[in-house]
Image (cartoon, rainbow, N blue to C red):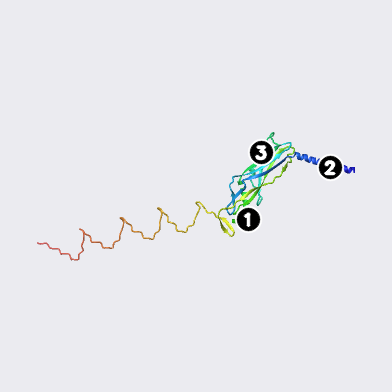
Amino acid sequence: MNTLKKNLNKVLGAAILATTALGVTSAHADTGTGYLTSASPDPWVVKSNGQSYTQFKTMGFVSIKGKLQYDVGVAGGIKSWWAQPEVINGYGIASPVQGLAAYKLTQAYPFGSRPNTLNKTLNFSINQGVFENNAVGMCNWLANSLRNQGKSNAQIFSQDREVNFTASLDYGVDATGAGSGNPIWEYSAPINIKVKCAKWNGPQVPTAPGGFVANPTPKGPNKFKANTQDPTPPKGPSGFKATTQTPPPPSGPTTLKANTQTPPPPSGPNRLKATTNEPEKPKRAKR
């Protein structure tokens, strides 16, 4: 009986020591969290042409905001930190957006000026081109899915549709102190960034049974129009005009006129007269 009591006391003592050690460890562990809060504008808009989705509506730079918090506890200091958004396609293939490392935020603190807590508001200003290919790809993936369900282009692009990115914060903190080797990070859920696949408002013409494509009227110098009428002859010095009429005779000094009448006999000294009488015999001189 006494042996049983001794063994039970050992078990209880070991449990108390383990619980105490765990409490001490937790009390000295660093703690932190990092998360995104919003994105603007809301939503990001992708334009269409009635057949497919083509490009972002001009936004310039988009903004993604977040928070980074850290606490070293009773001892230690924060040497540096970094953070950047991590964004993946929320529709279709979950491909990560490339190029976000160029927008990483970071800060280092010299010895003697190291804080023991961190509470940073983050604002990432990112060129829209970083996300454009992924956003357009998600919208077209959605359009293809709707075609596979039997919908025509007219039905697909007659209304706004929506896909989204899934975004979270990637971060790190370098600190000193007893609890810096095994910090406790609080989990935060990712946010959704809405992407509107905008409808097409232009004209559409049928191209095949059940299918439609955009048919905007061409504008500018490249616009052509068929004409079945005979062209108007050119004007100006080099212009020519066909005619079936006989041109009038020329006038002026060089005018020639045909005459079928017999001209009158000449008059004056040179006048000649035709005669049929025999000529007179010459007279002899008298002696």
Q: Nearer the viewer, residue 80 or 71?
A: 71
For disc 1, the marked residue is 146
Q: Is residue 82 left or right of residue 287?
A: right
Which is closer to the viewer, label 1 or label 3?
1
The image quarter containing residue 2 is top right
* Location of mark 3 (residue): 107
Question: Disc 1 or 2, which lies upstream in sequence?
Answer: 2
Sequence-first disc among 1 and 3: 3
Quick one: 195 or 78, which is closer to the camera?
195
- Between circles 3 and 2, the one closer to the viewer is 2
The image position of residue 279, as x and y in percent, is: 17, 64
Q: Are marks 3 and 2 in contact (CB under 8 Å)?
A: no
* Quadrant, the C terminus: bottom left
Amino acid carrying mark 1 in the image: Leu
Q: Pointer 2: what residue?
A: 12
Q: Could you tell whether 229 is left or right of 251 in the image?
A: right
Horizontal side of 45 relative to 223 (left or right) equals: right
Report, in whole angstroms, how far the alpha carbon at label 3 lies from the one at label 2.
48 Å
Work out whether residue 136 or residue 258 is closer to the camera in this orientation and state it. 136
Closer to the camera in the image, 88 or 190: 190
Q: Residue at x 66, y 38 (%)?
A: 107
